[in-house]
Image (cartoon, helix red, strand yellow):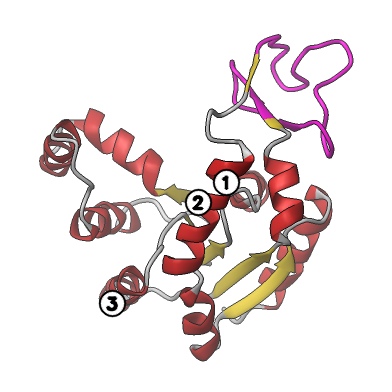
Amino acid sequence: MNIILLGPPGAGKGTQARKLVAERDMIQLSTGDMLRDARKSGTEMGRRVAEVMDRGDLVTDEIVIGLIEERLKGDQRGGFIFDGFPRTLAQADALGELLDRLGQTLHCVIEMQVDDDALVERITARSTCAQCGEGYNDIAKPIPADGKCEKCGGTEFIRRADDNAESLKQRLMEYYKKTSPLIGYYYAKGKLCSVDGLADIDEVAASIAALLDRAPA
């Protein structure tokens, strides 16, 4: 099963993608991770990525689609989760054309709905374990009282420099200008489903699981 997780920065897409990887053996396709891996790979595509990034330029949609195509032709396991891609209508068209060319299907687009004010409050309270990347939140999932990460036992926690109200509002504006039109795009294609992105993590996961269980194969 191939799905897109759609929502503004901080909606919890990465968290839910990791749960789907663990529980359904799906493969998370994060463009950031793919670009970093490609740069280290030494392949022709990797060299193209490195050249662009070394110049300080933005990686083109063509290169990102090329990386996705390479990945889709490999191990497919339980299907793919597109996390952070597509971000624009042009990218959505390109992804649709790629899937058609490879004989694959996009089964479901899950919009993680949020309230902006509540999202800002949540994001400015989040931190991660410096050792393993486990996420915490002062409100929803505080760092354990003993000061140790529940996953790896690490004792150092970091906050992103742009996890502040002003930076987040700018990122939200960028999302609404470029990415939110995808909601109507996928609704018109009959692919869109929605969940409450601000619910408890396990509640969101249960809602997503129910949608996937009902999605046509």
Dot 2 falls on a residue whose secondary structure is helix
Between the C-alphas of marks 2 and 1, the distance is: 5 Å
The front one of 160 and 156 is 160
Instruction: Give the crowd class for mark 2: few <14, some 14-19, many >=20 residues within 10 Å.
Output: some
Q: Is residue 76 left or right of residue 151?
A: left
Where is residue 40 shown, x and y percent of the image? 24, 28
Q: Amino acid at mark 2?
A: Arg
Question: Magenta stretch?
Answer: 127-156
Residue 79 in sight in this render: no
Task: Give whichever of discs 3 and 1 has the lower sequence position.
Answer: 3
Q: Amino acid at mark 3?
A: Glu
Give me the residue at 78% from left, 21% from top.
150
Give me the residue at 73% from left, 68% from top.
195
Dot 3 falls on a residue whose secondary structure is helix
Instruction: Give the crowd class for mark 3: few <14, some 14-19, many >=20 residues within 10 Å.
Output: few
The front one of 122 and 191 is 122
Q: Mark on residue 138?
A: none
Where is residue 92 shown, x and y percent of the image? 37, 72
- Above/below status of 85 relative to 51: below
Residue behind mark 1: 168
Q: Amino acid at mark 1?
A: Leu
Dot 1 falls on a residue whose secondary structure is helix
- Above/below status of 62 relative to 28: below
Q: Is residue 32 left or right of residue 54?
A: right
Q: Nearer the viewer, mark 2 or mark 3?
A: 2
Q: Is residue 204 left or right of residue 31?
A: right
Instruction: Report the residue that reaches farthest toward the right.
Output: 145
Between the C-alphas of marks 3 and 1, the distance is: 32 Å
Residue 193 on the magenta segment: no
Where is residue 97 shown, x and y percent of the image? 28, 77
Residue behind mark 2: 171
